[in-house]
Amino acid sequence: MSKPYLNAGLAHPVANELDAPYWQGLSEEVLRIQQCVHCAGWQWGPEWVCHHCLSDEVTFVEVAPEGVIYSYERVWHPVHPALADQGPYLVVLVSLPQAGNVRLVGNLLGDPMQEVRIGARVKGVFEHHLDGQPAFSLLQWCIHSD
Amino acid sequence: MAGTMRGRVAIVGVGETEYYKRGQAPDAEFKLALQAIVKACADAGVDPKTIDGFASYSNDRSDPSHLAAALGCRELRFANMQWGGGGGGGSGAVANAAAAIHAGLAETVVVFRALAQGQFGRFGQGPQRNTISGDMAHTVPYGLMSPAQMFAMKVVRFMHDYGVEQSALRAISLACYEHAQHNPRAVMHGRPLDEATYEASRWIVEPFHLFDCCMENDGAAAMVLMSAERAKDFAQQPAYVLAAVAGSHYRAGASVHNTPDYATSTFKTLAPRLYEMAGVEPGDIDVLQSYENFTGGVLMSLVEHGFCEPEACNDFFVKERFLAPSGELPLNTSGGNLAECYMHGLGLNIEAVRQIRGASTRQVTDVDLSMVISGPMVTPVSSCILGSEATV
């Protein structure tokens, strides 16, 4: 397993009632996004009801971990002690065209000083933290090579 | 407009504690709140015991019932909190107070905000705990956790969409710092900023240099509001509330950066309501205070309040335009959150009142319309337009 993108020491994500299928999916290398059973509308972050039709029959559906960079930022100033020696890092906001253009936050793997292009296609990379308390997995992104 | 509260309520008193660097206030937060309120009452010539309402925002910790008890207020009739974090509620609290007075729920309402970060901790730090769940579990593990990081993502997209250059952000920062050099209350008084220093300053998160980010301060600010009829009997020239609005667009609160209209200061739906209530247009505004959490928020706020087309930002955002007294659109004339004090933006509302009174340290000539934009990029946000006697 390769080294995680960010230095260890940030808070570990813990699933709650709303997003547990998402976190379980990442540990299985599957991306699951919330979709309405009634109207097939997508939404993210997860909610108790569908914001399109207000049905409470919402479920999690597997989608391809591929997306498009909607926005990004290069962070320099560490606001957490764990990142004191990190240096600059890239956070991306990735939209998923195959899931109603919902957006996910992640890191863009590779050189933190690389030029980032809004609209660039990216694919997901599952980053497992088996030593986490509890163990967890993140979804990172890299530029789509083809 | 039927039932409008345009011009029916006025701000008659303003008060501020000394402004301190964060963590350096000698007094407890609650005491700072009391000091600012008593000062605002003294400014107005109002007996603090006659205050019968309090309005604040951003989960202020100074509880109205406790304030009323501490001040010996005879009766409490209005205790109001504008929901939402950041400074988005600054002018919203003014709207709530004015609406309460206009509706007859209370007669003398204080709008206030108090902050003592040494006592209660900072905004600009990430959460330091072992685990996290809910919305922040989807951002914090990726190193996205501070306000600067939350909002840079919006500003990057806006600048990309409209080809906005760094110089536009820089102009805002330079104007604020230049105004602060004339304001002895300003924390950055005596600390001028030039273009080279701005450019050489470290990145916090691109596109925000250090000087694109607000300070964090300790202190308190308060304003006293009452009906326009009563206002004429008190000491100061009233600043009439011509319009005050708060809110946000469709699903602005969608979590994990999923609001459909993303690269916005959140004012697109509100600004037309503001101008409609006031019965004025952007070109009528004499002086503007626009909340700088980060300069990028000011940029989008001015666009969405109709001062500039988004495609024209690079030409519009030049320092000279924003300098009082001579610029076309004097901006943040006290130094604002960047260089006067970060009192969650209520200092901007107080500066807007000073401009109506003719009492600013960087006074604009003959101010009739004085506008405040509060807390861009959060939800709800708010803005207000104050007017002189001539406007009502």
Image (spheres, rainbow, N blue to C red):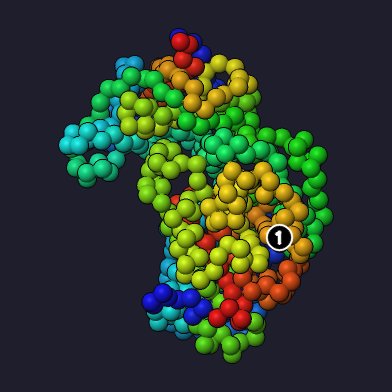
Answer with the quarter of the image where residue A122 lies: top left
Residue behind mark 1? B328
- The residue positioned farthest toward the bottom in the image shown: B233
* Amino acid type, label 1: Glu
| Image x and y of residue A99, in percent | 32, 28
Q: Residues within 10 Å of mark 1 (few under 14, many from 20)?
A: some
- Lateral position of residue B365 relative to residue B104, left or right: right
- Viewer-side residue, B193 vs B82: B193
**Is residue A109 visible in this depiction of the protein?**
yes
Quadrant containing the N terminus of chain B is: bottom left
Residue at 29% from the left image edge and 34% from the top image edge:
A42
Residue at 62% from the left image edge and 39% from the top image edge:
B164
| Image x and y of residue B36, in percent | 62, 70
- Viewer-side residue, B98 vs B27: B98
Answer with the quarter of the image where residue A20 lies: top left
Residue at 28% from the left image edge and 27% from the top image edge:
A21
Chain that bears disc 1: B
How many numbered badges does the structure rendering display?
Answer: 1
Residue at 51% from the left image edge and 71% from the top image edge:
B279
Quadrant containing the C terminus of chain B is: bottom right
**Is residue B56 visible in this depiction of the protein?**
no
In the depicted structure, whether residue B306 falls above or below residue A59: below
| Image x and y of residue B105, in percent | 39, 79
- Viewer-side residue, A45 vs A53: A53
Under circle 1, the secondary element is loop
In the depicted structure, whether residue A122 falls above or below residue B196: above
| Image x and y of residue B334, in percent | 71, 62
